[in-house]
Image: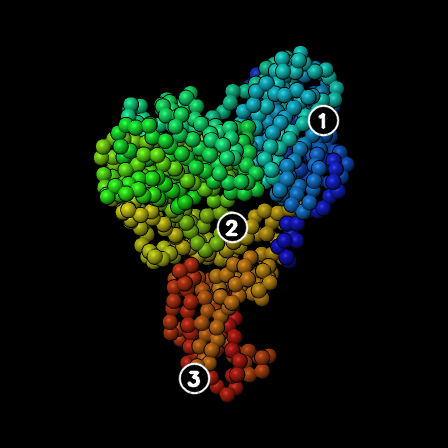
């Protein structure tokens, strides 16, 4: 089956269209109950839509007896532009976690309620994933909320937005009858609408206290902040999306209470002409293209600069640290003017959660200016987002004038695992460092111990570290020098089912099984990529079923000059007692009757550095007159 056809969205006519939804009384992850009443109290109402069963059809979704105090509730999608990129319905058949997603356009939703009593207080909670900025506007009966808060939670990387109305915001309350809730998405596309929950009351205030998100990447607080000679600038919100400077506010303070003390002579400007905008949370965001930033610092005299630390907080992805550059005009040893360009010397990086839009990632770069370096006065720091759809929320700049500054950050540790796995983590990799509790960066001379263990020993095996390490030592000890360190752990699956589970996607459109369960996609005889190798062979030779790689993984059978037959094929790099695949050479004189070739010896084994190895087998005694054809059969134990 063609992959694109499985995920193509139906085409719809332009205009307003409604979607039938299934009401659910079950608790939705991340949604809180009101704190001052029970949902069974008189003159209260509760309705939640979190199981979506379609995206076309007439207005439906009667809440029925599942909601107290509401005669009916209907949720509709309002869209002025629909195409193959959405809206589309993702998830398995009800009652799975179905959600509505769009790839390239804004969405608006309308929820019509009929409460049986006057509404004096209301609490609306929207759960979404992927849209970093939530909703541009949410109104109830035409009234804006009296308070708004959000909570980012790590379960599935989602965000819950909470909107509350008190009796004053509703101008004395709203009579019973039809009540419309309008929800307009703020970001352009890439928003997964997971659920909406509404609580209404005629007498109790339901406005919740905002919950502090726990998965924000934390800035490193420089120990010199508060020192009179140390200059600190903190941007916690932005106002200009393009070609205009953003100044820090004097009231901004870090987690330790240090306030910005240098704000007039330092700015951040987004310099790329893309359709960037400032979100409601004060971030600079662009859906259509990558953003770029200049941090400009103008020195007003004082002691020489000995250190610069620049940190950023971004959504989902990180600033590309390899592209963070310090540029300044200076003089050489002869007093001649020069322009100096330096990459960040030390780095810090922190990615909480899964790195989705529900996470805020802190990253940064540092420069140590020694007496031998060209002196620094005015400077510019240039940084790029790696791709579109990465909001920049905050930034901090420390300029240090302390003599003999040694720096506070360190080197990065990057840990990955191969081969390709699209679901789950076959290996669990732990980092042990007795010298410090800080695991985001490591100082030169600091030693760490990496240990890779199968997440499920019955399903996977650790088979070594990828080159340039090329080691099977486990644990692996590394001492940091003046470079970042990357380590890739290699694994091998111990069964077809284990390989199938991690290799195939686990997402699906409604009415279809996810790839890992669909026999037409991940079954033994399926050939998803159309390269001529069915999944059984992709598994046996360490291939990728989504990529046409038959030219790389297909076995090679050659007749040498002396008539000897040589067969080379790939297999998982596993001890013989753990192999569950038999590679059986066979011969035939007529391509109809095949016989087992028994006189075979292995002559060479080559590590492919991807969890597999290539083994060469030689047919002992060469070819016979009756055996003109050879093949390699695969048997799964």
> Which x, y percent locates residue 288?
57, 42
Q: Quadrant of the N terminus?
A: bottom right
For label 3, the crowd category at 10 Å Cα-Cα, with few meaning under 14, some 14 to 19 and many 20 or more, is few
85 is higher (above) or lower (below) than 114: below
Residue annotated with mark 2: 422
615 is higher (above) or lower (below) than 397: below
Residue annotated with mark 1: 112
* Proximity of marks 2 and 3: CB atoms separated by less than 8 Å: no
Res. 262 visible in picture = yes
State the CA–CA distance, disc 1 to disc 3: 81 Å
135 is higher (above) or lower (below) than 439: above
Which sits in the foreground, 237 or 192?
A: 237
Please report whichever mark, 2 or 3, sits nearer to the chain's N-terminal start: 2
Res. 217 visible in picture = no
Badge 2 element: loop
Name the residue: 34% across, 48% down. Answer: 485
Residue found at the very far right of the displayed protein: 58
State the CA–CA distance, disc 2 to disc 3: 44 Å
Name the residue: 51% across, 22% down. Answer: 210
Residue annotated with mark 3: 561
> Is 432 on the left-hand or right-hand side of 623?
left
Quarter where residue 532 is shown: bottom right
> Which x, y percent locates residue 637?
50, 63
């Amino acid at each position: 089956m063609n992959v694109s056809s499985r995920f193509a969205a139906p085409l719809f006519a332009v205009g307003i269209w409604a979607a039938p939804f299934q009401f659910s009384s079950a608790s939705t992850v991340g949604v809180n109950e009101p704190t001052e009443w029970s949902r069974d109290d008189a003159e209260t109402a509760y309705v939640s839509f979190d199981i979506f069963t379609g995206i076309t059809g007439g207005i439906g979704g009667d809440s029925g007896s599942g909601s107290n105090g509401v005669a009916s509730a209907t949720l509709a999608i309002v869209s002025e532009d629909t195409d193959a990129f959405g809206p589309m319905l993702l998830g398995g058949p009800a009652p799975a976690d179905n959600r509505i997603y769009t790839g390239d356009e804004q969405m608006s939703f309308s929820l019509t309620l009929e409460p049986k009593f006057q509404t004096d207080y209301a609490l609306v909670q929207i759960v979404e994933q992927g849209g970093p900025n939530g909703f541009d506007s949410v109104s109830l009966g035409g009234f804006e909320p009296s308070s708004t808060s959000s909570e980012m939670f790590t379960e599935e990387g989602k965000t819950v937005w909470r909107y509350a109305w008190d009796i004053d915001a509703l101008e004395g309350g709203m009579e019973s009858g039809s009540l419309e809730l309008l929800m307009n998405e703020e970001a352009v596309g890439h928003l997964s609408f997971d659920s909406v929950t509404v609580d209404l009351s005629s007498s109790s205030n339901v406005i919740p206290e905002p919950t502090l998100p726990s998965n924000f990447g934390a800035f490193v607080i420089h120990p010199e902040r508060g020192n009179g000679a140390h200059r600190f600038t903190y941007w916690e919100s932005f106002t200009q999306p393009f070609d205009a400077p953003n100044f820090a506010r004097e009231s901004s303070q870090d987690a330790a209470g240090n306030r910005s003390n240098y704000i007039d002579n330092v700015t951040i400007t987004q310099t790329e002409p893309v359709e960037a905008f400032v979100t409601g949370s004060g971030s600079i965001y662009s859906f259509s293209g990558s953003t770029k930033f200049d941090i400009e610092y103008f020195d007003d005299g004082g002691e020489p600069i000995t250190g610069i630390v620049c940190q950023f907080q971004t959504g989902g992805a990180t600033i590309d640290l390899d592209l963070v550059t310090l540029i300044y005009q200076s003089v050489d040893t002869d007093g001649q003017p020069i322009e100096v360009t330096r990459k960040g010397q030390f780095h810090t990086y922190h990615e909480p959660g899964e790195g989705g839009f529900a996470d805020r990632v802190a990253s940064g770069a540092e420069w140590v200016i020694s007496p031998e370096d060209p002196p620094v006065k005015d400077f510019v720091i240039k940084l790029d987002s790696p791709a579109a759809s990465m909001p920049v929320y905050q930034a901090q700049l420390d300029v240090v004038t302390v003599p003999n500054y040694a720096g506070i950050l360190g080197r990065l540790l990057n840990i990955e695992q191969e081969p390709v796995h699209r679901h789950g983590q076959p290996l669990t990799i732990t980092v042990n460092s007795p010298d410090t509790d800080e695991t985001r960066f490591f100082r030169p001379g600091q030693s760490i111990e990496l240990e890779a263990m199968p997440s499920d020993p019955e399903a996977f095996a650790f088979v070594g570290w990828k080159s340039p390490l090329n080691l099977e030592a486990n644990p692996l000890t590394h001492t940091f020098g003046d470079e970042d360190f990357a380590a890739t752990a290699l694994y091998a699956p111990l069964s077809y089912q284990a390989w199938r589970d991690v290799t195939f996607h686990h997402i699906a459109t409604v009415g279809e099984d996810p790839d890992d369960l669909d026999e037409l996609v991940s079954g033994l005889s399926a050939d998803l990529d159309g390269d001529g190798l069915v999944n059984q062979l992709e598994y046996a030779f360490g291939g990728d079923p989504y990529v046409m790689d038959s030219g790389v993984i297909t076995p090679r059978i050659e007749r040498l000059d002396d008539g000897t037959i040589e067969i080379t094929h790939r297999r998982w790099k596993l001890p013989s007692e753990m192999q569950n695949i038999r590679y059986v050479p066979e011969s035939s004189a007529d391509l109809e009757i095949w016989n087992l070739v028994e006189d075979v010896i292995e002559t060479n084994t080559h590590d492919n550095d991807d969890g597999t190895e290539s083994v060469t087998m030689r047919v002992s005694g060469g070819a016979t007159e009756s055996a003109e054809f050879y093949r390699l059969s695969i048997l799964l134990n």
